[in-house]
Amino acid sequence: MEKKIAVLGGGTGISTILRGLKDFTTNISAVVSMSDDGGGSGILREELNILPPGDVRRCLIALSNTDKTMRDLLSYRFKSGSLKDQNVGNILIAALTDIFGSFDKALLEMSSVFNVTGKVIPVTLDETHLVAEFESKDKVVGESYIPKMCYRLNTKIEKMSMIPHYPRANEDALEAILSSDVVIIGPGSLYTSIIPNFLVGGINEALRDTKARVIYIANAMTQKGETKNYSLKDHFEAILKHSDYEFIDEVIANDLRAKDEIYKYYYNKDESTPIFATEEDKKYFKEKNVLLTEGEFIEIKDGFIRHDGDKIGASIFRSPFL
């Protein structure tokens, strides 16, 4: 029997993992955060009063089984005119939402049209807005403003919350978590893609109650504004702080080092630095009884560091715990 996998996060981070998992199982559920308010998604959200389509679109593309032209079409962004910066896939989701009367039905139709493996599930169907409180005691509302404000104030995020407070979880998201053999968290922006899922009512309890093995895939690099100078332990503790329960069984972390010039590029561009498990991290996870799995889990493409979904998928499916 095929193993059932749920992947929890934001569209940009988890899409690579989803592509890798398709080689091992067709029973995949992508549970996607719904707080994006920037770019084309933000415009459609405000003007058409729909949920943000960008992250679910990325997951649909990752899990689709269609030709390259159709995938490119879904990713195409207009470069000029009144549609500048708007995305074809986002517009299609908006149109289907209007035709079928709901966002979740629109995703089902998109999944059928583009022959999607598994399911793409919004973590909540409620309209939500992220709130960040910084160590400086300043607050900001809106996912797209949080990293910018963090960088401008040169401060760290103290606490995340959501408006409304603990919105209702999508029942399909809860079912996906509770019925899976493995739940994967991440990778992705810690405070604006990963943690928002834990602020949705019922998600933490589902992660606590599931019989699944829960695996956190650590980011390969820190992120400007959100996680400057964060260690692997810092990322993990931020998740614990916002999730009420200690449900993570395993952490997957990259130990492949890129060339120095690539790291210099990242630092000069965004002050981003690589994340590797230190001896302190290893001691910490051992004390927490959390398995730390290290390996060559990135690939370098055109000078950019990306997670290698194939290698991560292979590592997960080789696990003796499955």
Image (cartoon, rainbow, N blue to C red):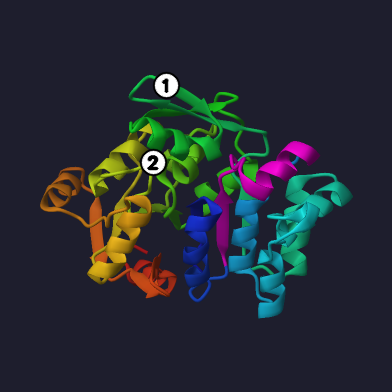
Q: Is residue 248 left or right of residue 115?
A: left
Res 268 → quadrant: bottom left
Residue 123 belongs to magenta span: no
> Residue 103 appears at what percent x and percent y?
75, 46
Write the residue at 48% across / 69% down.
Answer: 21
Label 1: few (<14), some (14–19) or many (≥20) C-alpha neighbours in 10 Å: some
Which numbered circle lies on residue 121? none
Res 243 → quadrant: top left
Residue closer to the observer: 91 or 109:
91
Q: Which residue is mark 2?
A: 226
Q: Is residue 98 left or right of residue 308?
A: right
Most extreme residue toward the right is 99
Q: Is residue 286 left or right of residue 268?
A: left
Do we see residue 74 in this rendering?
yes
Q: Secondary structure at mark 2?
A: loop
Q: Secondary structure at mark 1?
A: loop
Do we see residue 5 in this rendering?
no
Q: Mark 1 and mark 2: span between their CA atoms?
A: 15 Å
Write the residue at 60% across / 29% down.
Answer: 167
Write the residue at 30% across / 54% down.
Answer: 251
Q: Which residues are magenta?
A: 27-49
Which amino acid, mark 2? Answer: Glu
Residue closer to the observer: 162 or 137:
137
Q: Is residue 290 left or right of residue 103?
A: left
Q: Quadrant of the C terminus?
A: bottom left
Which amino acid, mark 1? Answer: Asp
> Residue 238 appears at what percent x and percent y?
33, 37
> Residue 262 appears at what percent x and percent y?
31, 67
Q: Which residue is mark 1?
A: 138
> Residue 54 appears at what percent x and percent y?
64, 52
